[in-house]
Image: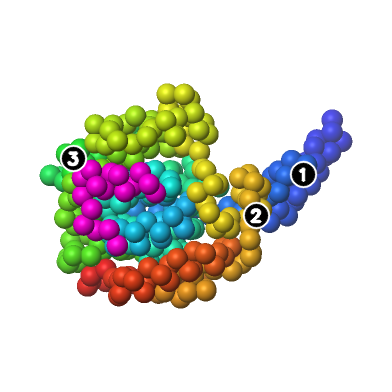
């Protein structure tokens, strides 16, 4: 009996040693599978800190659109060149664009597109995390919301409704016709930040004057034609984003929805789980071989930051820690993205900048 117990203890010890020997961030995989890199919890919270308190409907569009960084840059440039388009003219012009619906939906929020384009390395990291660890990303959002709620900084107001359903916190616009973009300082709104090596970053939309309040709003955005493409919504319990291409049909009836029905995991009625479309990636490299193989692509020039070809694409470096949320990244590069971002910088003139760790002022 003692011999059997001793053998079990030795086997358990050998198994533990083998587990500890696995590289950090590498998950166990089967024969022939390529190990994927994972984002640790602290980095996920860092990446989500600027947007976790956005309304669910807007947040889901940001998460999906972040997986298509080149289209985000193109849309930002397009919005600046077509800012006078309204109503049916905007609807017609958007239908001609081949961007993903999530990117089109953000046309209603030029300040959000600008943030994502200015901080393109952050956008790509966010997209990489969402592609590889969708549930972990959704869990991070809920974790951050609970922290803000516990601090008394996340509550129902005339701009938004905060609904607590058991372990889930839902944020909805107070009026479905008007969506307010929050402006807040994560170093205050979440309370004491638990990860000094991964400091959060905050971004104030243009026109919002930062004050003493931990949480505020920029001016509301009356959703229009572009919001008709916002048919993704949060599945918090499943750690996913659900799609229904017939959502928001009353906002934009001129969308050719048949182009999207039956695609990916959607059924013929246009409902199902969101599925990344590698075609909208437009050559931007994936973070690692596992993700690249999953979507039938390559990683490109591994280790080269997207912004390295064009420093303005990074929008400045974050401060503090080894990997600030808005600092240069180590992802695969794309000259097309840098080139497109450069065109936007030249055509748009000076854009509002943000800086990690600076309090006050405007962003």
Q: Quadrant of the C terminus?
A: bottom left
Q: Is residue 99 left or right of residue 358?
A: right
Of helix, strand and loop, which one carries label 3?
loop
Residue labelled with disc 2: 298
The boundaries of the magenta stretch are 81-97
Q: Give the left or right position of residue 199, taking residue 204 as reference.
A: right
Give the residue at mark 3: 177
From the viewer's side, name the closer residue of 89 and 309: 89
Q: Earlier in the sequence, mark 2 or mark 3?
A: 3
What kind of element bears circle 2? loop
Of residue 11 and residue 212, the one placed in the foreground of this image is 212
Q: Earlier in the sequence, mark 1 or mark 2?
A: 1
Image position of 222 with respect to 285: above or below: above
Figure colour scheme: rainbow
One can see residue 164 in this view: no
Going 30% across and 44% down the picture, which residue do you hit? Answer: 92
**CA separation, marks 1 and 3?**
50 Å
Q: Camera-side residue: 321 or 351?
A: 351
**CA separation in Å, label 2 and label 3:** 41 Å
């Amino acid at each position: 009996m003692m011999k059997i117990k001793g053998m079990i203890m030795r086997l358990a010890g050998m198994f533990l040693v083998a587990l500890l020997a696995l590289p950090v961030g590498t998950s166990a995989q089967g024969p022939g599978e390529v190990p994927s890199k994972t984002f640790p919890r602290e980095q996920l919270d860092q990446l989500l800190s600027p947007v976790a308190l956005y309304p669910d409907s807007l947040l889901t569009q940001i998460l999906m659109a972040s997986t298509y960084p080149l289209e985000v840059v193109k849309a930002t440039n397009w919005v600046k060149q077509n800012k006078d388009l309204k109503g049916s003219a905007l609807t017609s012009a958007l239908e001609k664009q081949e961007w993903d619906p999530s990117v089109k939906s953000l046309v209603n929020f030029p300040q959000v597109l600008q943030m994502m384009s200015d901080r393109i390395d952050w956008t790509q990291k966010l997209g990489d995390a969402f592609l590889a660890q969708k549930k972990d990303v959704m869990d991070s959002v809920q974790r951050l919301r609970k922290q803000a709620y516990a601090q008394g900084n996340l509550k129902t107001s005339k701009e938004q409704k905060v609904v607590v359903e058991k372990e889930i916190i839902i944020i909805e616009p107070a009026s479905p016709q008007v969506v307010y973009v929050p402006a807040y300082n994560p170093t205050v709104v979440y309370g004491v930040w638990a990860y000094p090596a991964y400091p959060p970053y905050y971004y104030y939309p243009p026109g919002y004057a930062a004050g003493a309040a931990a949480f505020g709003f920029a001016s509301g955005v009356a959703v229009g034609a572009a919001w008709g493409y916002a048919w993704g919504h949060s599945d918090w319990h499943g750690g996913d984003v659900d799609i229904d291409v017939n959502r928001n049909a009353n906002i934009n009836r001129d969308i050719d929805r048949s182009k999207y029905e039956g695609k990916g995991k959607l059924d013929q009625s246009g409902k199902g789980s969101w599925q990344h479309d590698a075609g909208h990636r437009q050559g931007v490299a994936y973070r690692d071989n596992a993700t690249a193989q999953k979507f039938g692509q390559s990683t490109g020039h591994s280790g080269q930051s997207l912004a390295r070809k064009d420093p303005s694409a990074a929008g400045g470096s974050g401060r503090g820690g080894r990997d600030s949320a808005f600092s240069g990244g180590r992802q695969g590069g794309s000259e097309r993205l840098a080139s497109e971002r450069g065109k936007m910088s030249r055509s748009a003139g000076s854009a509002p900048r943000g800086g990690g760790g600076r309090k006050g002022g405007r962003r």
